[in-house]
Image (cartoon, grey):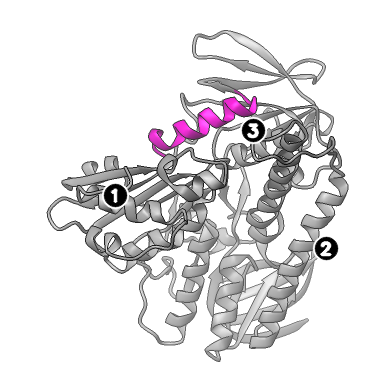
């Protein structure tokens, strides 16, 4: 059996793992990345990228249907149709280009990629497995665990059950046809992003959420705008309801409301989107006996685990489970191994929800500032007063800024509206640079753009908004 020695072994080729391997190779650290599936991980293959492709396709189809019935801007088309197989093929083409690009970057920078499933022997030794057989062993000085996460299943409705009706987001991103009736279990960002996309593709959609509001991770002022949009789209929302399972002939989902009353929602497919959990099983992690935070690996502000020279990044290290967090951690770990001084203490990590309208949250909300004992001021600027929003036929939503009352240091931004995901870079930069309200208010913003709402929110917080 072949044995190889290297400085760094990376388990997992997702955003965190491949970025760590690329950066380590750039820093001349001998690096081997082990990936049993496709490079790019959940994000590139069955998550961030394909979901945004399907969301875009759904938006374009809905726009065409809207124009078929006449529109206020004068565009009229004949009744449109969609070839969902071609849509999926187009989506797969984007995924293939990106994952191929990742492979090329790893090769270009000198990181070795081994196709196979990692099995941890100890903190310095990893076996590479294929079809249950050990291909080789690799010894290393540093072990980086970037194994990602998996979707949470409902024990009484596992994926693939009810004659294949129960699906995860993976299957939802590669449909062979658009179901007539789709029930989405879970009113978080994954469930709503895909639920909205399917509604625009023509499905009748019902969302079931156990809590009393959608998108519970976001503050209610933001989510109210999305809730209104769901109603306008014709999506049923059943709040405060729990799923009991399928009915006897698997034609409907049984739900129970807070009063204990049961009802049924007819369905052709059931998308279960109740969250994700760290992938910590199936590759020998338990042999290391690392300190854990629940299901997640416990790390410090350098992504070190409780075992020397064993590191963990991304979803396997817990919330927030975001690709850009994993990327930043992967780059940092590579630089620490190379001898640089780094700590993972970001001023903020943007969170974006690609519903329609979109949501973006960076830093503290007014409620979070108050809970932290900070005397803060906040101000909101509505897109209804923004010229660019009007030209995009989308004036719902707003931008909100939160800042310290004493020195006007910006603590956070929140926005809801069409295209606000692109404002997240400006929001994050202002926090990372330690900007004040005066800094943003005094920066000339291009006209007409959505970004003007950022400047106007800062101006309004200072008491002299110009366009409201």
Q: Which label was assigned to residue 442?
A: none
Q: How far apart, in angstroms, are the residues tagged by discs 1 and 2?
A: 66 Å
- Residue sitting at x 21%, y 46%: 377
User: Closer to the N terminus: mark 3 or mark 1?
Assistant: 3
Residue 74 sits above or below residue 111 on the image: above
Q: What x and y, as percent, mark residue 386? A: 43, 47
Q: Is residue 224 magenta?
A: yes
SS at mark 1 in the image: loop
Q: Are marks 2 and 3 in contact (CB under 8 Å)?
A: no
Q: What x and y, as percent, mark residue 59? A: 69, 44
Residue stretch in magenta: 218-236
Q: Nearer the viewer, residue 25 or 316?
A: 25
Q: Residues within 10 Å of mark 1 (few under 14, many from 20)?
A: few
Q: Where's the C terminus, which quadrant?
A: top left
User: Circle 2 sits on which residue?
Assistant: 131
Residue 408 lies in quadrant: bottom left
Q: Which label was assigned to residue 154?
A: 3
Q: Where's the N terminus, which quadrant?
A: bottom right
């Amino acid at each position: 059996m072949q044995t190889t020695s290297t400085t760094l072994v990376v388990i997992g080729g997702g955003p965190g793992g491949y970025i760590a391997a690329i950066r380590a190779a750039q820093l001349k650290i001998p690096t081997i990345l082990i990936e049993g599936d496709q490079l790019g991980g959940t994000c590139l293959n069955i998550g961030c990228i394909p979901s945004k492709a399907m969301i875009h396709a759904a938006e374009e189809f809905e726009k065409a249907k809207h124009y078929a019935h006449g529109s206020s801007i004068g565009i009229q088309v004949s009744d449109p149709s969609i070839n969902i197989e071609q849509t999926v093929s187009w989506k797969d083409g984007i995924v293939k280009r990106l994952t191929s690009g990742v492979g090329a970057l790893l090769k270009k920078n000198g990181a070795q990629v081994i196709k196979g499933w990692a099995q941890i022997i100890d903190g310095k030794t990893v076996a590479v497995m294929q079809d249950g057989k050990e291909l080789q062993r690799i010894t290393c000085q540093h072990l980086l665990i970037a194994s990602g996460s998996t979707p949470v299943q409902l024990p009484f409705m596992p994926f693939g059950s009810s004659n294949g009706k129960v699906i995860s987001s993976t299957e939802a991103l590669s449909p062979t046809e658009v179901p007539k009736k789709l029930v989405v279990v879970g009113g978080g960002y994954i469930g709503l992003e895909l639920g909205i996309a399917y509604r625009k593709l023509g499905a009748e959609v019902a969302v079931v959420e156990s809590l009393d509001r959608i998108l519970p991770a976001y503050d209610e002022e933001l989510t109210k705008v999305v809730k209104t949009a769901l109603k306008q789209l014709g999506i049923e929302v059943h709040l405060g309801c729990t799923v009991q399972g399928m009915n006897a002939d698997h034609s409907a989902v049984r739900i129970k409301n807070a009063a204990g009353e049961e009802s049924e929602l007819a369905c052709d497919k059931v998308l279960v989107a109740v969250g994700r959990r760290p992938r910590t099983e199936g590759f020998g992690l338990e042999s290391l006996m690392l300190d854990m935070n629940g299901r997640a690996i416990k790390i410090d502000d350098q992504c070190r685990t409780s075992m020397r020279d064993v590191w963990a990044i991304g979803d396997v290290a817990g919330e927030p489970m975001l690709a850009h967090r994993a990327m930043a951690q992967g780059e940092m770990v590579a630089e620490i191994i190379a001898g640089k001084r780094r700590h993972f203490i970001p001023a903020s990590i943007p969170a974006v929800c690609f519903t329609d309208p979109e949501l973006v949250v960076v830093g503290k909300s007014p409620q979070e500032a108050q809970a932290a004992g900070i005397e803060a001021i906040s101000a909101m600027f509505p897109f209804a007063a923004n010229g660019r929003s009007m030209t995009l036929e989308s004036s719902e939503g707003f931008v909100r800024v939160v800042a310290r009352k004493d020195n006007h240091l910006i603590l956070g931004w929140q926005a809801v509206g069409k295209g606000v995901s692109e404002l997240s870079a400006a929001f994050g930069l202002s926090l990372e640079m330690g900007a004040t309200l005066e800094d943003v208010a005094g920066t000339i913003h291009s006209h007409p753009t959505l970004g003007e709402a950022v400047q106007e929110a800062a101006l309004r917080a200072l008491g002299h908004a110009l366009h409201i």
